[in-house]
Amino acid sequence: MKKYFILCLMALMPLMLFAKKQPKPQEVDSLGRKIKTGWNFGILPSIAYDADYGFQGGILTNVYYYGDGSQYPEYIHSIYFEGAYTTKHHGIFRLNYDSKYLIPDHRLTLDATYLPDAMCDFYGFNGYQSIYHLNWHNWNKNTDKWNKKPEQLSTDDYRTRVFYKYKRDLIRVAGDIEGTIYKDLKWNAGLGVLGYIIDDCDVNMLNGKKRPFDPSKERWEQKALDPSAELLYDKYKTWGLIGADEMNGGWHPYLRGGITYDTRDKRQGPNRGVYTDLFLTYSAAFNAGYGQQATAGYNHLQFNFTFRHYVPCYKDKNGIDRITFAYRIGVQNLIAGRSPFYMNNYMNTLFIQRVYYEGLGGGNSVRGMMANRILANGFAFVNVEFRFRVVNFDIGRQHFFIGLNPFCDLGIVTQPYNLDDLVKMHTNGTYTTLQASMKAADDKYEDYFSTNINDIYRPHLTAGLGLKIGMNENFVLSADWGMPIDKQDNGKWANFYVKMGYLF
């Protein structure tokens, strides 16, 4: 990985040197701003924070080529590299290329990403049907704000702080292309591969040498993890909800095709227009389960639909859009075959534009909700926000702005798992119901699952506020604070995220 990082930096050095030789831009746009031309680049520390992944440290660079500036703020070429690691043992190693001009009249996006995750979130199937217990993985959390009774805060309920985790490494390689059918109506095609390597959390690695586990001590008086503690992921395997042919991941080449309609005035932070897409993704399967069982049954077809609308609400006397109302509606459903559980929290997209496509829950889908809180065969989501452009200013040759974004997000299950059917299939009929399987394992159904079937379709709601700092209209630093409406969506009062770009 170090060699890969060094090679990428070496590849970008000629671009950095060439960028310094570009002449100063002299032309201005209709708003009086200097138009960027030639190569523009920046190497920055990759410092960020995500409530689900922790503090992030590393390096990133984004190289833009604007040519003669006639299409500014659109770029001709964009090359992005990031290498980083977080305090919650999550890695990011990504190289991305995007252009509308490499192939004339076509947009091409290439992406290669490696995301090792020592503690991937897993809260069970079907959203609210799976009951979340804060003190099972965080006994000392102050939960008075949730109106808990004192006896419900007993440390005897604590199990392990990785109870809702498992180990997952994701390798993603993708290529996507877009062409024009007529004006703003486009066709899209793409192919790639998603590789998942899954296992139990490596407790010895997480403990390290400084905190070896000592069973003679009270568990809540030290931070070391108990290697013998059973995780929710382990229980799902024992109960038959996760099969032997999917429990260790697998490799899934995919083929994707669809159409888009795009009238946005710009791709990054648009102020007006519509973007909608409709596409199908066919994913094959091989080597899933790593030789345990055949996996041809995990070939599947998924349907996606997204609608985004940007409505300008207020423009100042200089013609600058100050307030924009923006919303996004999306659906992802399984329409044929079977999808392994680990692929059902991946949000399909026609173009790889950011690192994470986890859903539903977290800073990339429903802000303020725990990552992967909704795990089902199908789901829908809504994001609504007002975008206030508070101030514009220049520093040297660079154009900056600061904005505020109050928002409200929603997620809902549209295609739930049939838990009894999963148990019958994965236990070869040994158990015909989940309750029977759990009873055999000495687990109580009501401790893990709601007895009200209507909880499956109950909406998950969050609300919050975002801060945006932008440079040259394309480079945007985003900080979002989101709060869940229901305590089952987050053991904390709220979640905070510092990322790059707008959510949509």
Image (cartoon, rainbow, N blue to C red):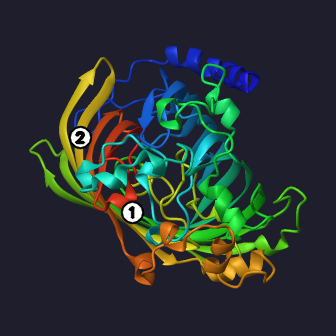
Residue drawn 33% across the image and 35% down it: 470
Three-letter code for the amino acid on which mark 2 is drawn: Gly
- Looking at the image, residue 410 sits to the left or right of residue 57; the answer is left
Q: Residue 363 at what x, y percent from top left? A: 42, 48
For residue 263, the mark is: 1
- Looking at the image, residue 202 sits to the left or right of residue 23; the answer is right
- Between 94 and 217, the residue placed more toward the observer is 217
Q: Residue 23 at what x, y percent from top left? A: 44, 18
Q: Residue 12 at what x, y percent from top left? A: 63, 23
Q: Is residue 183 visible?
A: no
Residue drawn 64% across the image and 18% down it: 14
- Between 299 and 127, the residue placed more toward the observer is 127
Contact between marks 2 and 1 (CB within 8 A): the answer is no
Judge depth for marks 2 and 1 and give the one in front. Answer: 2
For residue 1, the mark is: none
Three-letter code for the amino acid on which mark 1 is drawn: Thr
Q: Secondary structure at mark 1?
A: loop
- Near mark 2 (Cα within 10 A), the count class, few <14, some 14-19 or many ≥20, is some
- Quick one: label 2 or label 1, which is nearer the N terminus? 1
Q: Name the residue at the front extreme.
A: 216
Q: Which residue is mark 2?
A: 403
Q: Secondary structure at mark 2?
A: strand
Q: Name the residue at the left extreme.
A: 317
The answer to which quarter of the image holds residue 128 is: bottom left
